[in-house]
Amino acid sequence: MPESGTYEELKYWYLRDHKLFRALSFSQIKQLCIIVGFKKAKKGDVIYFSSSDVPRIFLLKKGHIKIVSIDEQGNETIKDIIRKGDLFGELTLENDLHSNEYAVALTDEVAICSFLMSDFEDLLLRNPSLALSYTKFVGLKMKRIRNNYANLVSKDARTRLHHFLKDWSEREGKREGNQVTIENYLTQNDIAQIICTSRQTAAQLLSELENSGLVLYKRKQILIADITKL
C-alpha cells in the first residue's frame, strides 16, 4: 500500500499536467490537492451514479469510461465516451435529480481524481481565470454532445456508424497514409448503444464493412483500410 505522500504527489502531478489547471500557481494546486479524491478502477467497475446524494466532478487521468444514460423505459444508451483529460459528473454544477445515468470503466487501470461539487464551486469563485477556463471547457463538451445527438436524430444507422468510426479515428487512431488503426476497448453492444441501434444491426453493419474490405474489426483492434472511403 503506497504511503499517503505518494498519493499527494500523484494528485499534484495529475492536476498540474491538466490544461484546465495550468493557470493556477504551485500553492493553489497544492491547496486543490487537499480537496481532491483519488481512486483507481478496473474494467466493469461503476464509477458514479447521477442519483448520488453527494454530487461530484470527476477528472479522468488514465483509461476510458463510458457514460450510460437510462430512459424511462429502462433502455440504455452510451451518452459519451470519456477519455484521458476529460471531466465528467455534475459538470453544470447542478445536481439534476431527474438525470438517470452512470459511468463505467471500459478499460483496466483507470485512474480518476474527483472533487465534491461544493468544494469545486468554492474553488471557481476564488479563481476567476479558472472559472473562465472551466466555462469554455464545458461549453465545448456540451456542444460536441449536442452535435452527436443531432447526428443520431438526422442520420440512418449506417451513416451514424461511419460517422462514429471517423470521429473515433480522429481522436485516437494511429494513421499511416489513409490506413487507421484504433485500439479497441468497445464491444459490438457498446457501439450499438453509441449509435442508438440494436446489437444485431451494429454487427450486421460492421460485417458489411468487413466484407467490403474497408474495416477489420477485432476484439482488441480495429483496422480501417482507407479512412477517406468510410
Image (tube, grey):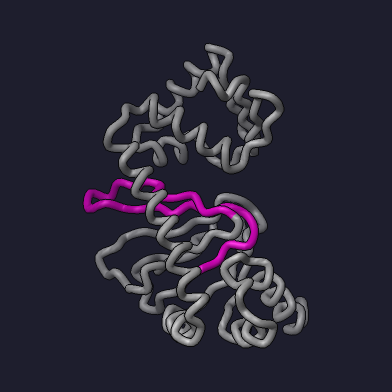
**Magenta highlight: main SS:** strand
Horizontal and vertical percent position of residue 92 = 36, 68
Q: Is residue 192 in sight in this rendering?
A: yes
Q: In this view, does 14 lie to the left or right of 83?
A: right
Q: Residue at x 44, y 50 (%)?
A: 80
- Can residue 43 be seen here? The reply is no
Image quadrant where residue 118 sits:
bottom left
Of residue 23 and residue 199, the one placed in the foreground of this image is 23
- In the image, taking residue 98 as reference, residue 87 lies left or right, namely right
**Lateral position of residue 65 relative to residue 146, left or right:** right
Name which residue lies at 64% across and 58% down: 62
Name the residue nearer the viewer: 220 or 194. Answer: 194
Q: Position of residue 20 (x, y in %)?
A: 57, 68
* Rendered view: 152 above or below 19: above
Count of number-bearing discs: 0
Name the residue rendered at 61%, 33% in the picture. Answer: 219
User: Horizontal and vertical percent for residue 171?
Assistant: 57, 43
Farthest-out residue, top: 212
Instruction: Compare residues 221 and 13 and report the one nearer the observer.
Output: 13
**In the image, what residue occupies the spot 46% across and 37% down?**
191
- Residue numbers of the magenta segment: 57-83
Name the spot of residue 35 as percent of width and height, x first.
56, 84
Q: In this view, does 157 lie to the left or right of 24?
A: left
Q: Is residue 105 above or below residue 48?
A: above
User: Which quadrant, please, contains the N terminus?
Assistant: bottom right
Asked if 145 appears above or below 190 in the picture, the reply is below
Q: Does the magenta stretch include residue 196?
A: no
